[in-house]
Image (spheres, grey):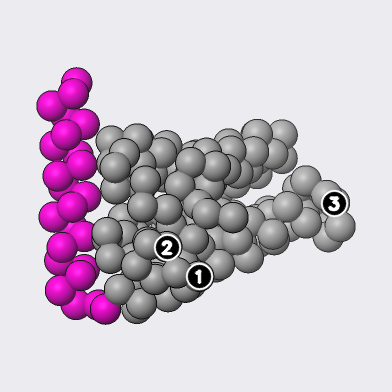
């Protein structure tokens, strides 16, 4: 199992090296922040309809929002993380703690958990069961929180 985790960490670093060759560290941060902002906007759409009830429930809109979240989660955003993109190098441009790269196995696990939760949200949103969507929405939020708690500076 440890070898598998180390292999996964190596794959993240290799993918990261490819992205680094194409983007400057500041561009990597800007691109990943845009992806997270777009996911947050779509989470807000689901929250307004399924969690808060501030907007009427529209299954097609909820499914579209969930699909957008899943698409970004599956887009390979891990390649936008490099040791040159932490608070140590870029200050307040980013909130990525350097500890991320000291714990790549854990970061990879959290990322895989997030992707699985996003895929589950898209799946249940396609079916339209609001109770299942509510649970899956909470799972996505929980996976976001676990990464923020560990690797995001205040």
Question: Residue 92 location in percent, x, y?
Answer: 50, 70
98 or 28: nearer the eye?
A: 98
Between 28 and 136, the one nearer to me in the picture: 28
Q: Position of residue 67 (x, y in %)?
A: 50, 56
Does residue 76 appear left or right of residue 16 in this picture? Answer: right
Quadrant the N terminus occupies: top left
Q: Please report the residue visible at 39 percent of the width from the left and 71 percent of the height from the top.
A: 90
| Residue toward you, 48 or 105 | 105
Instruction: Say which residue label 2 marks.
Output: 87
Dot 3 or dot 1, earlier in sequence: 3
Provide the secondary structure element on which disc 2 rests: helix
Quarter of the image containing the C terminus? bottom right
* Label 1: few (<14), some (14–19) or many (≥20) C-alpha neighbours in 10 Å: few
Q: Percent from the top left, x then y, of residue 133? A: 65, 40
- Give, as a single range, the part of the protein colored magenta: 1-24
Location of mark 1 (residue): 92
Figure check: 3 above or below 117: above
Q: Residue at x 78, y 56 (%)?
A: 48
Q: Which comes before the other along the chain, label 1 or label 2?
A: 2
Q: Quadrant of residue 127?
A: top right
């Amino acid at each position: 199992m440890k070898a598998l985790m180390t292999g996964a960490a190596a794959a993240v670093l290799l993918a990261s090296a490819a992205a680094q060759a194409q983007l400057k560290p500041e561009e990597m941060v800007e691109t990943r922040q845009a992806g997270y902002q777009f996911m947050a906007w779509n989470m807000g759409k689901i929250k307004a309809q399924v969690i808060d009830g501030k907007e009427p429930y529209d299954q097609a809109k909820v499914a579209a929002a969930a699909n957008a979240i899943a698409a970004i989660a599956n887009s390979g955003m891990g390649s936008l993380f490099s040791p040159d993109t932490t608070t140590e190098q870029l200050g307040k441009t980013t909130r990525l703690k350097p500890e991320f790269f000291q714990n790549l196995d854990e970061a990879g696990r959290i990322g895989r958990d997030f992707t699985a939760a996003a895929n589950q949200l898209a799946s249940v949103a396609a079916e339209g069961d609001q109770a299942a969507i509510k649970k899956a929405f909470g799972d996505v939020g929980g996976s976001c929180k676990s990464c923020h708690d560990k690797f995001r500076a205040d």
